[in-house]
Amino acid sequence: MPYTQLILNVDDTEAVRYAKTHTLRSAGFRVDEAATGSEALRKVAELKPGLVLLDVRLPDISGIEVCRRIKADFPATMVLQVSASYISAVDRVIGLENGADSYLAQPVEPAELIAAVRALLRISAAEDQLRSANENLEARVTERTRQLLETNLQLTRESAEREKATKIMNRAQQLQKDSPTLTLATAGFMAQKELE
């Protein structure tokens, strides 16, 4: 099954990078590659991948720092950190605390890599759907608020007109009571002039 989201595979060891890229492409993923942290950051900004498969040990910038920058600039981009060197629980915690969405120790079995990537892409898709639903809801709330404000303004105008009409009617009845020869229409006209 082909996947539409691009995966950026970042690893400075060419053989390891090749193996992960081959595994992912064989599973139907679109994959681009980077060998350094700076190249990874440039490609993330340029290509907007759905997921970055990121080695922790890179020659120029730490993978932890690359992850932190990706998450700061592109928070919706999923980051799966991998490492053959930093595999202790503390290392994984540091990676996760700095923004990684998951962390795998290398060597990683192809099936596990594919399953982890699929899981993160499912999470990403669910987050995208949630963001979209939230934006939709916000737009509906904004529109409904606008409609309610318009209705409230109309009701305020109508209420003011009713209040004015009631005052005119009350004054017209009072004028007619004081002068029984006045018709209600004449008394209403006089009351309206008085209250203007």
Image (cartoon, rainbow, N blue to C red):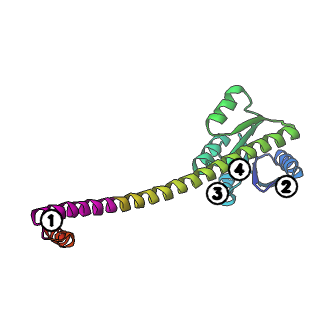
Q: Contact, CB < 8 Å: mark 4 with mark 2?
A: no
The residue pinned by badge 2 equals 2
Q: CA distance from mark 4 to mark 2?
A: 27 Å
Q: CA distance from mark 4 to mark 1?
A: 94 Å
Q: From the top left corner, tell me how far across and down residue 91 is, in percent.
A: 68, 30
Q: CA distance from mark 4 to mark 3?
A: 14 Å
Say few, some or many: other residues with alpha carbon within 10 Å of mark 2 (under 14 / 14 to 19 / 20 or more).
few
Among numbered discs 4 and 1, the one appearing first in the sequence: 4
Q: Name the residue type under label 2.
A: Pro
Q: Which residue is rendered at x = 25% and y = 63% of the image?
A: 165
Q: Name the residue type under label 3.
A: Ala
User: Residue 159 lies in magenta, yes or no?
Assistant: yes
Q: CA distance from mark 2 to mark 3?
A: 23 Å
The residue pinned by badge 1 equals 176
Q: CA distance from mark 2 to mark 1?
A: 87 Å
User: Residue 157 lies in magenta, yes or no?
Assistant: yes
Q: Which residue is rendered at x = 62% and y = 51% of the image?
A: 133
Report the disc number at residue 45: 3
Q: Contact, CB < 8 Å: mark 2 with mark 3?
A: no
The residue pinned by badge 4 equals 36
Q: Nearer the viewer, residue 129 or 162?
A: 162
Using the rendered image of the protein, determine whether residue 59 is visible from the camera's viewpoint: no
Q: Contact, CB < 8 Å: mark 4 with mark 3?
A: no
Name the mark nearer the viewer: 2 or 1. Answer: 1
Q: Contact, CB < 8 Å: mark 3 with mark 1?
A: no
Among numbered discs 4 and 2, the one appearing first in the sequence: 2
Q: Contact, CB < 8 Å: mark 2 with mark 1?
A: no
Q: Name the residue type under label 1.
A: Gln
Among numbered discs 3 and 1, the one appearing first in the sequence: 3
Name the mark nearer the viewer: 4 or 2. Answer: 2
